[in-house]
Image (cartoon, grey):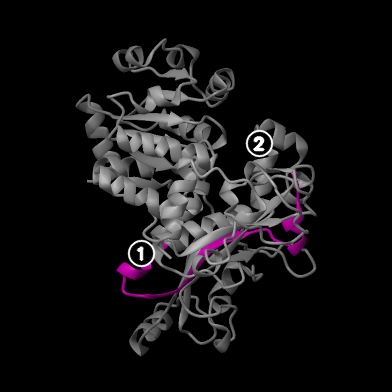
Amino acid sequence: MGLYEQLLERQELGNPVRVGVVGAGKFGTMFLAQVQRIPGIHVVGVADLRVDVAKSNMIYAGWSAEKLNMPSLDAALTSGGTHVGEDAMAVINCTAVDIVIECTGNPVIAVEHCLASFSAGKHVISATVEADAVCGAALAARAKAAGVIYSQAYGDQPAMTVELVDWARTCGFEVAAAGRGHKWKPEYRFSTPDTVWDHYGLTAEQAQRGRLNPKMFNSFLDGTKPAIECAAISNATGLNAPTNGLTYPSGSIDDIAALMRPRTEGGALEELGMVEVISCLAEDGSMIPNDIRLGVWVVVKATSEYQKNCFEEYMVSTDDSGLYFCNFKRFHLIGLELGLSVGSVAIRREATGTAKEFRSDVVAVSKKDLKAGEMLDGEGGFCVAGQLRPSAKSVPMRALPLGLTGDIKLVRDVPVDTILTYDDVEIDEGLHAVKLRRECEAMV
């Protein structure tokens, strides 16, 4: 039986998967819009510090005020409705909740929520991929020790790319590279929330209609989110990060197979087995037709003459050597697709991607000249952007993880376009996110 049929069966038996959602921003709201149409899933509680905004978002996404106005979690359980409140720990510790969906977007807070969920015996689906980049391998180890599952969120690009890599390897192919698309120019790494919509391709009116957070969307544009997501892909699949960061080769979907070959074969890779991002912009800044900007891909290499001949016989689109083939999903639908993770974790007891090691890291790089005493403003802000590096390179240099740059103080000046280190900031070693980060660093 497929997941849908099994969820339908649970609905008919009166035994739905009971879910708690922590964070009702864009990702959470997208899932909440869809879950009304998915059988066998009951959202018992939604926690957000801005309860009025959370309720407004849910009504905007199609919820009735009656259904989301349960006065307590117990009332939600007995009625089949949903309680919306500000207490995340109440949702996490609700005995009836099976799965906690963490989508606050704040890595430090997300780590706290994950650890509390593990202690309460809850599975976690984390849409806060920033936490995964900081200490995903340690979170996965803690979940395993607690006998629960820690999963990436399907609909986000890491889990979808992990699925493609798994497809390739299960079919017996060698994976040359995997990753996502992006709209990229080198100068975008200095973008701020004030400039994001000019570059992103949305009007201010569209951003306002969608209730889009300029800081969050700027984290995509300035390269931070691509780096974070590629780190999550790398740590889940064992593919390597480029030594000096993502290179963003430009091309259409039809170009990916040729681009994702080693440089010795005319491609853009350092070597086989890498993560990378394909840009949809040509050198002159124009959009490339048939782009992969909003999608994910994997490139496989034929390892025998027989495989290569099969590509040819079945008219597979390959590079000019006939050895490299790209499989892809051109679009991802973010929170609209999260039901696949809920079904997979609850029914199959399988994560839709999880960190297995600390192979790749996201380091903080200054966007401007920073001064001692200045407060960093984290992902997508005015101060720093994230760049991908191999952990074997970042850890010895004491590079500051991008995910730990929210509201921390600089203790010395840092010039523009410089990788920050722990020595540049006041770091709180008591934070669980920092403690788990140290556990990951010890793995290198």
Amino acid under disc 2: Leu
Magenta span has 183?
A: yes
Identify the element where label 2 is drawn. loop
Q: Is residue 337 above or below residue 82?
A: below
Compare residues 277 and 443 and report the one nearer the observer: 443
Q: Position of residue 136 (x, y in %)?
A: 43, 52
Q: Is residue 277 left or right of residue 168?
A: right
Q: Select label 2 or label 1 by which is in front.
A: 2
* Residue 353 visible from this viewpoint: no
Where does label 1 land, which residue? Answer: 167
Label located before the other in sequence (2 or 1): 1
User: At 59% from the left edge and 22% from the top edge, which residue is drawn?
Assistant: 53
What is the quadrant of residue 137 in the picture? bottom left
User: At 56% from the left edge and 58% from the top edge, which residue is drawn?
Assistant: 362
What is the quadrant of residue 165 in the picture? bottom left
For the residues labelled 2 and 1, the Cα–Cα distance comes to 33 Å
Compare residues 233 and 114 and report the one nearer the observer: 114
Amino acid under disc 1: Trp
Magenta stretch bounds: 164-192
What is the quadrant of the C terminus in the image? bottom left
Where does label 2 land, which residue? Answer: 212
Compare residues 121 and 53 and report the one nearer the observer: 121
* Residue 164 visible from this viewpoint: yes
User: At 43% from the left edge and 15% from the top edge, which residue is drawn?
Assistant: 67
Q: Position of residue 13 (x, y in %)?
A: 19, 27
Q: Is residue 189 above or below residue 112?
A: below
